[in-house]
Amino acid sequence: MSATPDPSTGTDDSASKEERLKEYLLSKAQDGELYFKSKFIADEVGLSPKEIGALMVKLRDSATELSVEKWSYTSATTWRIEPA
C-alpha cells in the first residue's frame, strides 16, 4: 500500500469543481431565479449530491455573481439562486 498522496484530492480539484458548479448555476439562472435539489442536478454537473451540498455552502459566501439561499428542507435541501 502506497503512502503517496492522491493528486485528485488536491485543492485544485476542489476549485475546479466549485468553478464548474458556479458556471452551471450561472447559465441556468441567467433568466431569473432557480430552485433545485442537489440530487436532481448531480448527473448534469458530474458531482455527487453531497459534493454539491458542500460546494453550495462555499458558493453562498464566495460567489459574488450569484445570490445563494438555502430555501427549504424536505427530504433534501432545496437551494434558491438568482443572479446578483
Image (cartoon, rainbow, N blue to C red):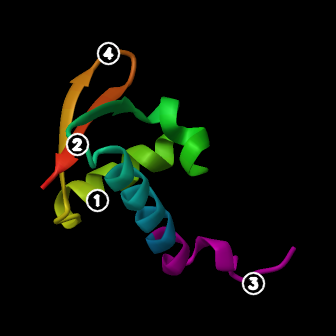
For this orientation, the residue located farthest to the right is 1
**Residue type at mark 2?**
Ile
The N terminus lies in which quarter of the figure? bottom right
Residue count near mark 4 (Cα–Cα under 10 Å), binned few <14, some 14–19, many ≥20: few
Q: Quadrant of the C terminus?
A: bottom left
Dot 1 falls on a residue whose secondary structure is helix
Labels 3 & 4 near each other (Cβ < 8 A): no
Determine contact: label 4, label 1, CB under 8 Å. no
Above or below — where is 47 with respect to 9? above
Q: Which-is-in-front pick, marks 2 and 4?
A: 2
**Lower position in the chain sequence, tag 2 or tag 1:** 1
Q: Describe the element under mark 2 as helix, strand or loop.
A: strand
In the image, what residue occupies the spot 27% across and 49% down?
30
Label 3 sits on residue = 4
Q: Nearer the viewer, mark 3 or mark 1?
A: 1
> Is-magenta flag for residue 6?
yes
Spatial separation of the CA atoms under disc 3 and disc 4: 41 Å
Label 2 with label 4: CB-CB less than 8 Å: no
- Label whose residue precedes the other's in the sequence (3 or 4): 3
Nearest to viewer (mark 2 / mark 1)? 2
Verify CB contact (< 8 Å) between mark 2 and mark 1: no
Q: Amino acid at mark 1?
A: Lys
Residue 41 place in picture, x, y as percent: 50, 37
Q: Secondary structure under badge 4?
A: loop
Q: Position of residue 11 (x, y in %)?
A: 48, 78
Residue assigned mark 4: 74
Residue 65 at x, y percent in the picture: 19, 63
Indicate the secondary structure of the residue bearing disc 3. loop
Q: Which residue is mark 2?
A: 81
Stretch in magenta: 1-14
Q: Which residue is the site of mark 1?
A: 58
- Of mark 4 and mark 1, the one earlier in the sequence is 1
